[in-house]
Amino acid sequence: MGKKGAGAFMGLINRFGPSILPFADAATEELPLQRLLRLALFQVSVGMSMVLLTGTLNRVMVVELGVSAWLVAVMVALPITFAPLRALLGHRSDNHKSAFGWRRVPYLWMGTLLQFAGLAIMPFALLVLSEGSGPFFLGPLAAALAFLLVGAGMHTTQTAGLALATDLAAPEQRPRVVALLYVILLVGMLLASAVFGLLLRDYTPGRLIEVLQGAAVVTIGLNLLALWKQEAVNHERAKARHEPAVPFLEAWRSFSSHGQIRRLLVVIGLGTLGLNMQDILLEPYGGEILGMSVSATTTLTALWAAGMLAAFSLAAYQLTRGADPYRVAALGALIGVGAFFIVVAAVPLESTLIFRLGTGLIGFGGGLFAVATLLAMMAFAQGDQSGMAVGAWGAVQATAAGAAMALGGILRDLVGLFAGWGLFGEGLSGAATGYLAVYYLEIGLLVAALVMMVPLLREGGPRHGGSSRFGISDFPGA
């Protein structure tokens, strides 16, 4: 009965998927929809871990466990320290030697085990940290190890998974495939937020252990299902496993020798900083400055996510029709600049509607920028360098995003403190000054990214021509 039910469900997906699922026509005969959706499950496990690290555990550690906020901030930031190694991970997976000729599967599995290990020990580490039992260093050390393991697993899994998707997808289908993978990541984050919030509504230490260890088991299950029979046995690569691998620095020099790549990485860093410094500030801004209720500020995440989904749709639609990815990325940065001006204008206008509009546009601009820059980077992969390309993009993007959140909070507090002392004059002594300083800095960073993009726009980026169909049947022009 189980097999019949699963077969019937996948039959419905195959029959109706292209009409109702975003980017479902990313599938081809070589990469059918069922296989593509199964591969995308690794993004669900990554999204679940992201929600745990930056959302659920953040609140539980501060409120329920009584851990100092500065220590929580350090723990949440620890996984970001692994992000710069993503280019190295991608290179290692490009050149991995195995008896089966596999390159991506071993790294997907290694990342899965790291995620599992971190989540499995995390509840006990947090309880030791909060209760202070044992030597004073034991709690922080155990918690740091758990967060590092989860972070290392997330980055390894996502780098290898995106590289595998690049290997499997035809060049003209990659915009749709990348958009689909990011939709699944977003959906996974939203579902995980709802489920964890429901399960931890009545918090107890025992419930925390159950939730985190359950997440560890779910991670193993999702990633096993995602990688099962995705990468074929390659006898040619298996025979060549004793040949010496290309050293990372040599491979990096070869990969980055193209003049556009280094400039593109700078653009990715500046743009990501400009689009993410407000990440932990929008909800406090809405509550403290605009007087929004808790329930009202919680809708901001949904508005941001809706903007991201719309951006994925537009990016895939344009790029599969041969649009220049640099122009799509520049459009995302321009929309981001406008979005922050709108958010700033919400204060003198005293309008929560304007603020919500700006929040949605931040998500929209960020989605366009992320997808377009990733596809531009992937296009530079020559031969077996897709892991290097995805890893380089991920290293810069993840590092910049983590740094942006930390810098945003620090800058708001410092400027707010100086404003309260009256250093900027009476007109700028209000609570909004710290927030506005961050938003104006983000505008400056996005403008700097646009200036850096001018030579890229003149030269033009790689194009992804393809079919005229898109993944949402009712999208204009589809």
Image: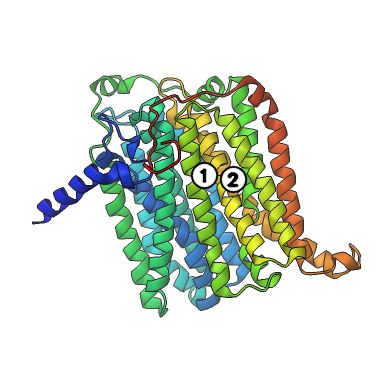
Amino acid type for the residue under numbered disc 2: Gly
Q: Which mark is residue 365?
A: 2
Task: Tell me where residue 49 appears, x and y as whole percent.
Answer: 43, 56
Q: CA distance from mark 2 to mark 1?
A: 7 Å
Q: Nearer the viewer, residue 8 or 118?
A: 8
Q: Nearer the viewer, residue 386 or 240?
A: 386
Task: Tell me where residue 153 appears, x and y as whole percent.
Answer: 42, 49
Residue 73 appears in which quarter of the rendering? bottom right
Say above or below: 447 vs 350.
above
Q: Which mark is residue 11?
A: none
Q: Which residue is mark 1?
A: 311
Say above or below: 442 vs 283.
above
Residue at 12% over, 56% down: 2
Residue 231 appears in which quarter of the rendering? top left
Task: Tell me where residue 127 appears, x and y as whole percent.
Answer: 45, 73
Is residue 9 visible in this depiction of the protein?
A: yes
Residue 156 appears in which quarter of the rendering? top left
Is residue 91 visible in this depiction of the protein?
A: no
Left-right relation of 427 to 140: right
Name the outermost residue toward the left: 1
Cβ atoms at labels 2 and 1 below 8 Å apart: yes
